[in-house]
């Protein structure tokens, strides 16, 4: 019987109970074939696509993100129709803040176009004649987490996220061949390439939050495992730059990042999350692709950590890693 991993300590997650339930799989599709069968034209579009102008300040853009509870905005230049010049992520704004030395410098006057990360400038735009597989391939190739979709008149009519692709896989799990869904994590291509331990960017629980975000910014990652600093370096939390949107409107921002430890900030961010995920979500090598998808979907998170028998982090699996596994391997 497969067993589901326990977290490193209180605050780490375990797979949802459904992972232990008997299942009957009737259809036998490869994940890539499933995604190819889902046309973009039929994918639900947001009721409204929120954007900001390239000349808007980051303060204005951030206000739009907070008001509408989004973590990314297409940045547009005037015209008819407006031209998309980039995707402004909340991590771009965090990047501005972490380059400040004392938290008092004015980052709010920087424009959205100036704050764009180079990888998110002039993003590819997909035609709605394609499928979700086209979105997955684009995300794998570019490591962008969102895709703009245009209709036959070249008007942007949809905005698809990596979580949308995960949701498509999750809602159709019983149509996917078990040789994929029951594949152990130990057999994932990413794990087989580094069977003992993946090289990971980590931070210590006692590090200041601002230094933790400087590490995230320096290595161009969206999140890091927070370790307890003991000899075993056990996992205690996950720190994600995008989660900062929950507190970024606080009047103490960004001084909060200088005052709190990485672990204390994780606890603060955790209290704002409506899915109530543990501080860190973990699995073990004998869990399966199905477990990974169910865990990511259940908690609406972007990464899970893989622990060894000593409860040490050996690997990180993101949604893009899942897409690579199901599409390429």
Image (cartoon, grey):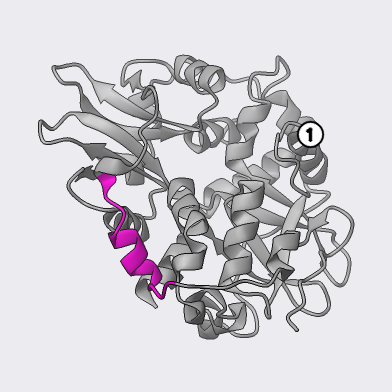
Q: Quadrant of residue 51?
A: top left
Q: Nearer the viewer, residue 72 or 297?
A: 297
Q: Is residue 200 visible?
A: no
Q: Which residue is mark 1?
A: 271
Q: How many marks?
A: 1
Q: From the viewer's perspective, is residue 46 above or below residue 194?
A: above
Q: Identify which residue is drawn at 78% across, 48% down.
A: 207
Residue that appears at 27% across and 50% down: 39
Secondary element type, mark 1: loop
Identify the residue at image location x=50%, y=54%. 171
Please indicate whether residue 51 sits to the left or right of residue 71 in the image.
left
Q: Position of residue 78 (x, y in %)?
A: 20, 16
Q: Does 191 lie within the magenta span?
A: no
Range drawn in magenta = 27-40
Q: Which class describes the residues within 10 Å of circle 1: few (<14), some (14-19), or many (20+)? A: few
Location of residue 180 with respect to 119 vertically, above or below: below
Q: Along the line of sight, which residue is nearer the eye, 25 or 220?
A: 25
Picture quarter with the N terminus: bottom right
284 with respect to 112 (left or right):
right
Q: Residue placed at 37% from the left, 37% from the top?
A: 44
Whether 32 is among the magenta residues is yes
Q: Position of residue 25 (x, y in %)?
A: 52, 73
Q: Position of residue 316 (x, y in %)?
A: 61, 65
The image quarter containing residue 147 is top left
């Amino acid at each position: 019987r497969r067993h589901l991993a326990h977290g490193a300590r209180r605050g780490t997650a375990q797979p949802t109970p459904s992972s232990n339930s008997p299942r009957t799989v009737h259809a036998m599709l490869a994940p890539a074939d499933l995604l190819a069968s889902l046309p973009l034209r039929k994918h639900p579009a947001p009721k409204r696509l929120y954007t900001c102008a390239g000349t808007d300040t980051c303060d204005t853009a951030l206000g739009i993100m907070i008001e509408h509870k989004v973590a990314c905005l297409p940045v547009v230049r005037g015209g008819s129709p407006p031209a998309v010049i980039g995707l402004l992520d909340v991590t771009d704004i965090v990047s501005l803040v972490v380059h400040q030395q004392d938290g008092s410098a004015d980052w709010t006057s920087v424009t959205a176009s100036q704050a764009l990360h180079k990888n998110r400038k002039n993003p590819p735009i997909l035609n709605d004649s394609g499928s979700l597989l086209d979105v997955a391939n684009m995300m794998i190739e570019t490591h962008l987490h969102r895709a703009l979709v245009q209709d036959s008149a070249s008007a942007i009519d949809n905005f698809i996220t990596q979580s949308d692709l995960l949701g498509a896989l999750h809602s159709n799990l019983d149509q996917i061949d078990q040789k994929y869904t029951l594949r152990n994590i130990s057999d994932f291509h990413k794990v087989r390439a580094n069977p003992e331990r993946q090289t990971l960017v980590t931070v210590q629980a006692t590090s200041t939050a601002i230094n933790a975000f400087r590490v995230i910014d320096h290595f161009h990652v969206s999140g890091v495992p927070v370790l307890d600093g003991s000899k075993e370096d056990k996992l205690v939390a996950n720190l994600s730059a995008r989660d900062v949107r929950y507190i970024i409107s606080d009047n103490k921002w960004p001084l909060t990042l200088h005052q709190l430890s990485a672990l204390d900030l994780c606890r603060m961010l955790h209290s704002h999350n409506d899915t109530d995920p543990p501080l860190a979500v973990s699995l073990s090598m004998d869990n399966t692709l199905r477990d990974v998808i169910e865990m990511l979907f259940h908690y609406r998170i972007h990464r899970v950590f893989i622990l060894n028998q000593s409860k040490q982090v050996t690997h990180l699996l993101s949604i893009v890693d899942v897409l690579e596994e199901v599409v390429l391997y």
